[in-house]
Amino acid sequence: MAVPNKEVVASLTERSTDPLRSISLSPSRRFGVIAGKDNLQLVKISPDGLKRLRLLNITQYLQTNVPSGERQSQPAKYGDVRDTFGLGVPKQSTQRTMSHGNIAVTCAAWSSLQQTEQQASETSDQTPSLDAEKANSIIAAAGSNGVVVVWTSGSFFPGGGGGSMGNPQPEGYLNQHSRAVNSLAWHPRQPGLLLTASQDATAKLWHRKDSIDRKGEDKRKKSNWFANKANTKDSKVYQWKCIATFKPKNEAIRDIQWSNFQDDIFALVTVSGSLIVYNRYIGMRALAKVAAHDGDASCLDFHPTQPYIIATGGSNDNRVKVWDLESNITMSKKDDHNISVNAGTLNTIRSETENSANSVSSHDTDKSTPRLETSNSSNGIRSLNGFSQNSSTLSNTTLSRHSKVSSPLSLHVLSISAAVTKIKWRPSASSVMDDDEVDRHESMLAVASARQASAGGSGVLGLWSCDRPFMPLSVVEGHEKGAIGDFVWLETPYRNTKPTSHPLVSSAEPMDKSRSGSVGRYSPSTTTDGTVVLRGSLRGDAESILFDNKEKDDERRAAPRIWQHILSVGRDGRCLVQSLVRGERPMSRIPPSCFALANLSPFQTGYGSLQVFSVYQNVPKGAENDMKLTGLRRDQYTAQAPGIFKEEMSDEEMEFDRSDGLDFFEPGRRFPDTSPELVFNVVDGGKLDSSGLPINEDVEAICIAPEVLHLSRFASSYQLYPDSELTARVDLCLHNAGIAENLRRDSLARMWRSIASMMQGAGLDELPKAGTSIAPTNVMQFVLLPTVKSLLLERAEAGDVQTCVAVCEVLQVIDSDQNTKIPGLDITLLREWYLSYIDLLEQMCLFSASAFLIQRCNDPVIGAMNQNSTTIHESCSTCGKPLQPSTEPGGTTRKVCKTCRRPVGMCFLCHQPVTALYVWCQGCGHGGHLECALKWFGGFESEPPREICPTGCGHRCNFQKMNS
Amino acid sequence: MQNQIMDFSGPTSTSKVLTSRHQDYVHHIAFDIYGRRMATCSGDRFVRVWDLSENNVWSLVGEWQAHKGSVAMLSWAHPEFGSMLATCGSDHEAKIWEERTNATSAASRWTVKSQLADARKAVSCLEFSPRHWGLKLATGSADGCVRIYEAVDVANLSQWPLATTLQCFAEGLGVTCMSWSSGRFEPPTLVVGGANPIVYRYGEASRQYSPLIVLPPPAVGEVLDIAWAPNVGRQFHYIASAEGSQLRIFKLSRKENKLELESTQTLQVINAWRCQWNVTGTVLASSGDAGLVQLWKSDFEGNFKCVSKIQGDIAQVAAGAAAGAGLMSP
C-alpha cells in the first residue's frame, strides 16, 4: 500500500543485508566507497544512477593482531584464498568468517594523493582522467578493532592495477588504536595526512612517508611493484607512521575533521558532548574545549566557506549547534612560537608537502601582522552570510586573544526532533549565474536523524537553515527502515554551452581550479580592497576562498553550482540518491491563518456572542518562495541536468518570474521575524440596555446565531411549568411569547402565541395522551398536533434546541411512559434535543438551569442523569475506615464510628456536632462547620490565615489558598 | 516574567491583539469548551495556555515545551474528565497533558500523562471524541493512519491503549485532518481528511470501524481541514471541508441511522485553510489569506452564504481602527 518514495531518484540495485556505515567519494566525485559490515563497495555515480563496481570483503585485512611487519605479509600469503570480492561471491570459509565475525568496518575515507598545486596545473585545461584518479588517490578503511587499512585506489578498480579480480594490496596498516576507530579524516589539501579518531579516547595523526631502505621489505616491495603498477609509477614504497597522538579527554571520540581553511587545525567531538579543537603541532593543549551537547555529540562539520564556523550534532539532546570559534582558532603569539619549534622537529613532513607547507607558513605570518584587517574582512564576510552575531566584539577578542579565550557561545541552535546522526553543510551554492542571480541561502545544513539513536525508525534527512531552528525546509525519507549511516552531497551537473564529454567531470572542474586559489593566496592586498567574495567550493576535499578575479568570474558564470542531491547509505543496507527538491516541505503544512471560535462564556460581558481568536502569519509558500527559502531549484539549469539529476520545472514554476521579490528574503533573516500575533474579535451580540435587553437600534449588532445569542437569558426567564400564578399552559405560552418579544425574537414570540391560540381554540390545556384515538372535537384539535410537530422540526433544523425543549416541556410532549404525545415524533429525536440542550446549558455554565430541567423532565432517561455518579462514600475522619450503615433500628444517622468508637460529624474547631453545611479537607479528611473553617483558614475575625489543620494532624489543608 | 495581558471592554469593542510569544508560526488555536481558556501551539515546540480572568484579561497561565518537534494540533478534553489537553507533533508522538492545580510556575503546570508513540510519521491532527462515547482520542498521522486510543479507566489517565488503527490512505499520503461526529444515538463516527474525505463508522456487529462514505476528492490538492458540524437534533449532518481555493459543505441525511450523502455545496473562497462550526452547527467559520475569518450561514433555501467577515490581519485591523471603523469590514 505504500507509495514509492518520489524523492529517491536512484538506488543501488544490490541491497546489502547488513547496515551500511560510511560513504566517501573519490576526488573526482565520480566514484564512491561504501563501508558495509565486513566489506567495502566501490560504486560508480553517474547521471544514469548508481552502479556497483566491486564488493570487497576486507575483514581479512582488519583481522590481525600481529606486529606490523608480519601483518604486511599477510595479504600476500592468503590473498588468493581469501578472494571474496566480486558480485555475489559468498564467503568461502565459515571458519574464517567466524574469526572475522566480530570485526566490522566502521568507516571509509577516500582522498587524493596529488599535491594541490600540481593538480591545479594538471587540470587547468582538461578534466582529470580516470587513470589519474586511480593512480593518485588513496582509500582508508577502519575496523571496529582499531585497525586502519590503507590502499591506493588503483587496486580497487576492476581492470586496474590490482587486476580484475585481484586482491588489492594494502599499502599500510595503522594498528595503534586499541578500540574501534569511529572516524577517519584525510587532510583536504595535504595528501597523505590522515587523522583517526577512536573509541579508545585517542586521535592519531598518521603520515605517509617514502620508505626506501628498510630491511626485509624487498620481497614486499617487489610484490607491490607488480600488484600496484598503476600507482607506483614513481616506484616509491610508502610507509605509514603515527606522528602525533591526541588524547583530549578520557572518553571516546566520535567524529573528527580537518579545518577547511587552516591547514593545521582540526576539531573533534567526544561521546560526552565536547567539541575540542586542536592545532596539530600543539598536542598538549587544545585550542578550544566546548561543552557542546548534553550527552553524545555524534558528528561535526566545518563550514565550507567560513573558516571558524563549526556545526556539531548531538544524538542525545537532538540538537545541532553552530559555533564560532574564531577567537579560539586564531592563534596567539605563544602558539606561533610553539609551532615554529615543533615544525623544526617535523621537518621531514614539511619538506614533503613543501608547497602547501610554505603556503601555510606564509599564511601564518601574514595573519600575525595584519591581524586586524583579516578579522575585519572576515567580519564582513560573516555578516554577509548571516553570521553577524558577535561580530562587533570580535576585533577586541582577536587583539587580546593571547590572554584568555572566552568560552564560545553557539551562534545557532537547531532543534531536530530526533537523534542527530550526521550533519553536513551544504556546499556553497552561491555563484553568479548567467542572470547575475545569487542564491542567498547558502548556510544550510543537511541533517540526518534517526528516531531512535540505535535502530529502527526511518532515517530522515532534512535540509535545515539556521534561520528556521525548529523545522527543516525539506525532508527526504528514502531510508524507510533504519537510520542513515552516512551521506554526502552530490552536485547537480548540467549541460552548459561548453561541450564536455562528461557532465559530472565538467562540474568537478572548477573545484580543482578552486584548489589553486587556496589559502596561500590569502594576502592582505586582496582583503583590503574590500571586494572579497566567498565562493563555492567542495566539501570534504577542497575548500577555498576565491577573489573577485575576472578570469575566475567568467569560468564561474559558466558553472553555476547546484547542490540538491544527497547520496546516503543506511542501516537498511540501501544506498540511495535522494533529491531534496522532491522532498516534503514541512512549511507547506503551516496554515497562513488559523483561528478558534467559541461562544463567550457567561463570565464575559455579552455572553452568547461569538469570540474569535485568529492569527495571520505570512508563511512563505509556493514555488516562488520555495527556491528563495531552500535554495533548491527547479529551473532551466536543472531541467538540463542529465539523468537522475534532472528536475523539470512545473507549470507553476514556469510562470514564476524569479526576479521578483528577491529582496524580501534577505539572507540570515529569520522568519517569522516577530512572534505571531493573536487577534481577538467578538462577533454577534449587540449592546444591551440597563435592564439587559437588546437595543434595537444597535447598528453593530449582527445576529449570526440567534439561537445561541440569548440562550442564557431565555434559559433563565422562560417559564416551562405551571405554578401558582400561571396555572394554564396557555398562560405559559403567552408568558414565554412576551419574553421572546422582549428579547427581540419576534418569530419566536409569534410561535408561542400561535401555540397558545391553538390550545385555546382546541379547548385543551394539555396534549392528548399518546395512543388515545379520541376523535378531535374541533378543527383546532385536528391541526394542533401536526402543527406543533412541524414547528418543532422547523426549530430543530435551525439548531434552536432551546425552543424545541421549551415547547416540549410546556406541552409535556413526553409522558412518563417514554412515549411522545405527538405521533410521528420519535422519542430518540426528542431525547437528542434534550441532551443537546443540556449540553449547551452546561457548556455555557448554566448548571442550575440544566439541573432544573433534568429534575423536572418526564422522561426517565433524562431524569436519571441527575443520579449518575452521585454515590458518596463516607469514611471516618479519625480512623479513615468507611462508615458502616447504622444497625440500630430506625437509626439513619450515625453518631459513632463503628470501628474506632469515636463520634462522627464533630467540628474540628469547636468540637460541636455539625448540623448545617459540613466542609472538610480532601487531604486529611478533617472538617467541620463552614464558619469555623472560614475562621480558621480564611483569616476572618482578625484571625491570621492559617494553613495547618486545626486538629493538629499536621496536614497543610490550605494549600490552594497559599498558592493563589 | 511579565505575562502578556490584553484587556477588552465589551462585546462590541474592536479587535484586540495578543502577542502569542511563540517563536515560530502558530499551527493551531483552540478554545476549551467553556470559552474561558485558549491554547495555542506552534512550530517552536511550545504550547501556551491562556486564561480569561474575571476582569476580562487574557493572561498566560501555562507554557511548556510539549514536543521535540513542531506541535501541529491540540485538543481539549471535555471537562468532565478533568483539565486535560492532547497535543501532537512532528516528533511522531501524541501526548496527553493534565493540569496540576498546585503548580507554582507556568512551565510546570501541565504534566504529561501519556505518550502515544505509535505513528510512523508526524502526527498531524487529533481530536477527543464527544464525551458520550467515552474518553477516546483519535489521531491522524502522515503515515496515512488514523489511530483511536481509548482511556479504559477514566481515573487513570496514563493508560491509553490503542483501540483501532485505520489505514485510511496509502503510506505516502498522509491524513491531514479529522473530525468526530457528534451524533448522540449513533455509533461512533468520524470523518478523515487527506486526499479525499472518508467517513468511518464503528460497526457494533463487526466491532470495528469501517469506511462508510468515501466523499469525492477536492478539485485541487488535498483536504486541509475538516469539521463535522455539531448535531443538535437535526435530521441531517453537515461536514465542512476546507480545501484551499474552495470550501465544500456535505449534507448527509441520517434517516433510520443510515448515513447518505444528500448534497454537496461548493463555496468558492479566496483561500480556506481552517474551518470550524459553532456550537449548534448553524454557523461555519473559515479562515483564509490575510487572516480573514469568514462566517457562513445557511439561508432559507439551504445555501450557505457569507454573513460576516472578521479581519484578522493586524495591519488592516490597525488601519481600520485608525479610520474609526468597527471590527467588521463590509
Image (cartoon, helix red, strand yellow):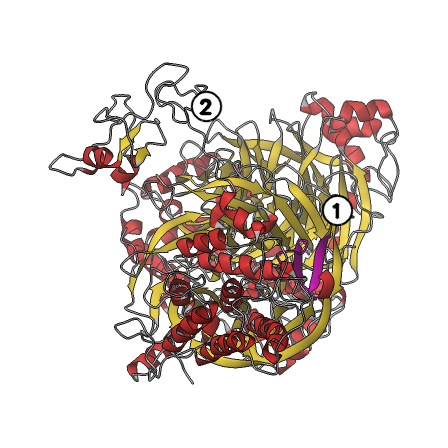
> Which secondary structure lies at badge 1?
loop
Tell me which segment is drawn in magenta.
B183-202
Q: Residue at x 37, y 58 (%)?
A: B21
Q: Mark 1 falls within which chain?
A: B
Q: Position of residue A279 (x, y in %)?
A: 45, 40
Q: Mark 2 falls within which chain?
A: A
Of residue A829 and residue A137, the one placed in the foreground of this image is: A829
Q: Is residue A900 left or right of residue A269?
A: left
| Location of residue B179 by image quarter | bottom right
Residue A110 in view (yes/no):
no
Residue under pointer 1: B207
Q: Position of residue A213 (x, y in %)?
A: 67, 30
Q: Is residue B47 magenta?
A: no
Q: How many marks?
A: 2
Seen as rendered, the residue at the extreme left is A942
Which numbered marker is on residue A885? 2
